[in-house]
Image (cartoon, rainbow, N blue to C red):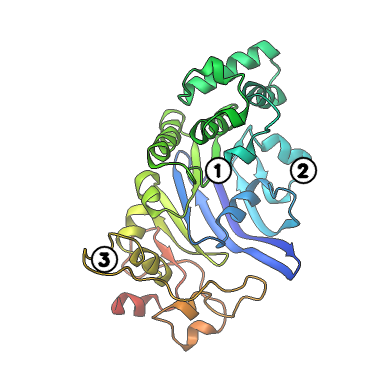
Amino acid sequence: MSHLSIRDLVTEFQSPSGIVRAVDGVSFDVNPGEIFGIVGESGCGKSATCRSILQLFGGAAARVAGGQIMLEGAGDLASMKEGALSQIRGRDVAFIFQDPLTALNPTMRVGKQISEVIRRHRKVSKKEAREAALQLLRDVHVTSPERRLDAYPHELSGGLRQRVVIAIALALRPRLIIADEPTTALDVTVQDQILRLLKERRDSFGTSIILVTHDLGVVSQICDRMAVMYAGRVVETGLVRDVLDAPSHPYTKALLAALPGQTGRDQDLIPINGSPPSLISPPDGCRFAQRCSFAQQQCTTGRPPALQQRRGGQSGHLDACILNEVVHVAA
């Protein structure tokens, strides 16, 4: 049984130019104890999908306009009112934001920010909450945790701030953690440490993790399964090794071809020409068709098929290309 099951999710944002359907019919499952990666270009709907799970839109004019977000043991989060969702946030599902500096309150000491999360959901004293906060900082390998407990966020490095954000996310031992590009703007060494922390949490407690990233190298390093998004839709999903070793959707193929190391030493990278379509007035048919070297007339009309398994493909490896058999032969 899936820990999280998202079906036909639709999320809309109000912009000065009109309604932006940032998430358009997205479906995927996250199994207990797995790390599920979501990848794609900037603006493809990765973060919007994850923010929809807990309806954390940061004050933006946004709404979940359709679909289901079924969390095991909790029901449909998409239809929950704010009061019920506030009990889910942190306790059952925790969110690690992309920018730890803006995720933390600059006027509050680190220890108090962690303690407040604990006391919001548990009946413990201030002293007990502070002791728990101290242990959480130790758990995420913060150096000199006693001193960091009384520091303000601006007094910490980017890597330490991200560890504090992770400590807050772990405070109530949630069953699901959503990590939205948690290693952005961190140097390579700190990135590796943060990813190890997340994997350590999964291995020790069986926590499910959704990892949003634009870095396919990170996905190959830490994730079990993955979804590839383009222009608000999932175009391919499956085990990481299946998707990266034998990509089936033209967009996934193009992403991989544009990566360093995918072509020969003396060969140029192959860029993806053009730009993603507007999500205010998206084109009919496959949204990648205008940039796809395999596109045919039928790709530009009607809605692409639902995610389906390619003939002869691996079980659970699905794509949404109407020409998948043609692409398979031509690739």
Q: Which residue is mark 2?
A: 82
Q: Looking at the rendering, which quadrant does residue 260 occupy?
A: bottom left
300 over 92 or under it: above or below: below
How far from the left and from the top, in percent, is residue 74? 65, 40
Q: Which residue is mark 3?
A: 263
Which residue lies at the image location 49% right of the left edge and 20% below the top edge? 138
Q: Tag 3, which secondary structure?
A: loop
Among the two numbered marks 2 and 3 on one chain, the one whose residue lies closer to the N terminus: 2
Q: How far apart are labels 1 and 2 at the CA level?
A: 19 Å
Q: Quadrant of the C terminus?
A: bottom left
Would you say residue 36 is visible in this rendering?
yes
Relative to the observer, which residue lies in front, 80 or 94? 94
Q: Amino acid at mark 1?
A: Ile
Disc 2 packing (10 Å; few <14; some 14–19; many ≥20) = few
Q: How far apart are labels 2 and 3 at the CA level?
A: 49 Å
Q: Amino acid at mark 3?
A: Thr
How far from the left and from the top, in percent, is residue 165? 57, 33
Q: Which residue is mark 1?
A: 178
Disc 1 packing (10 Å; few <14; some 14–19; many ≥20) = many
Among the two numbered marks 1 and 2 on one chain, the one whose residue lies closer to the N terminus: 2
Q: Amino acid at mark 2?
A: Glu
Which residue lies at the image location 63% right of the left edge and 63% below the top edge? 22
Which residue lies at the image location 54% right of the left edge and 39% below the top edge? 177
How far from the left and from the top, in percent, is residue 193? 40, 34
Residue 328 falls left or right of residue 278: left
Q: Tag 2, which secondary structure?
A: helix
Q: How far apart are labels 1 and 3 at the CA level?
A: 33 Å
Q: Looking at the rendering, which quadrant does residue 131 occupy?
A: top right
